[in-house]
Amino acid sequence: LLGDIALARNEPEAARTHFLTAFQLDTNNLESIVRLYELREQGIPAQAFTDVMTATLKDSSLPVLAVRLVADSYLSQGNTAQAALYYEKLLDLEEFAADPAHFFTMMMRKNQLSRDQYNRLAPDKKVISLRKLMERSEPTGGALLTDGERDYYVNAFSKSGFTGPINWYRNWTRNWELTAGVDQRIEIPTLFIGAADDIVITTEQIDGMKALVSNLTIKMLAPCGHWTQQERPDDVNRLLLEWLG
């Protein structure tokens, strides 16, 4: 309200101070976010809005609307690269963070497809798409998580969003480029726990480690899918303790 009064008095800088204070008290306050964005029409540089929002994103998440306004603001400044980055973040937020409960209900499953069944599929069917998975209304296989465990994940990702974890995969190619000259061999004792029915990590990839890891121990769990810690927690802990001992 104090910000609106300042605007009525044609005092945009004072209004920005009031709206900024309201935003800092509650970074989910949509009204203060929109008001800060609209100050562009009152002579406040668009950069001032993006600076505040991006600084906040370094330490916490923002509502989907705020991320969209950041993207729009960068676009209005002619910074298409940054605009594209935040539109990508928005895509992640809208598709996955819009319904974290559905995401973890669909994702954390077991007894879905064995490696042998997967290997017999036609090449065009061997596509793992999270987006297509999220379009389904009903999950397949069996649940890996109890309701309490699922709620724990849902609560955590409702606060943080999915952009951080997804960025690890998005940066995969760049990581390889940056470490092109680094010796990839591992000379220390190493344990790999895999799963017989993991269709994400292939047997060729597992075998490929042997040439790069001089002291490698491989343990395969069967039957078991990709989520070894959730599907076979006792066996994973046992293998870890045996190996460390």
Image: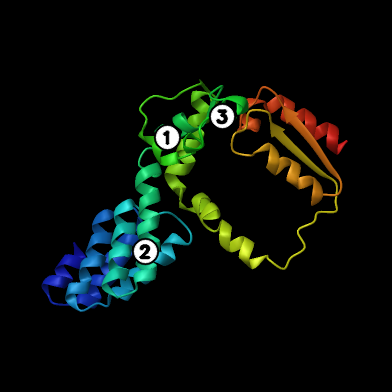
| Secondary structure type for disc 1 | helix
- The correct choice, above or below, for 226 with respect to 35 in the image is above
Judging by the rendered image, the residue that carries numbered circle 2 is 84
**Residue in view at x 26 percent, y 66 percent:** 36
Nearer to us in this view, 90 or 140:
140
State the image quarter where residue 101 is shown. top left
Rendering coords of residue 3 (x, y %): 20, 67
| Secondary structure type for disc 2 | helix
CB atoms of marks 3 and 2 within 8 Å: no
Q: Earlier in the sequence, mark 2 or mark 1?
A: 2
- The correct choice, above or below, for 14 with respect to 233 in the image is below
User: What amino acid is found at the position of numbered circle 1 in the picture?
Assistant: Leu
Judging by the rendered image, the residue that carries numbered circle 3 is 118
Q: Earlier in the sequence, mark 3 or mark 2?
A: 2
Q: Residue furthest front?
A: 122
Judging by the rendered image, the residue that carries numbered circle 1 is 133
Instruction: Report, in whole angstroms, how far the alpha carbon at label 3 lies from the one at label 2.
Output: 35 Å
Q: Is residue 108 left or right of residue 70?
A: right
Nearer to us in this view, 132 or 139:
132
Quadrant for the N terminus in the image = bottom left
User: What amino acid is found at the position of numbered circle 2 in the picture?
Assistant: Ala
Q: Is residue 130 left or right of residue 215?
A: left
User: What amino acid is found at the position of numbered circle 3 in the picture?
Assistant: Tyr
- The correct choice, above or below, for 103 with respect to 117 in the image is below
CB atoms of marks 2 and 1 within 8 Å: no
Q: Earlier in the sequence, mark 3 or mark 1?
A: 3
Nearer to us in this view, 40 or 7:
40
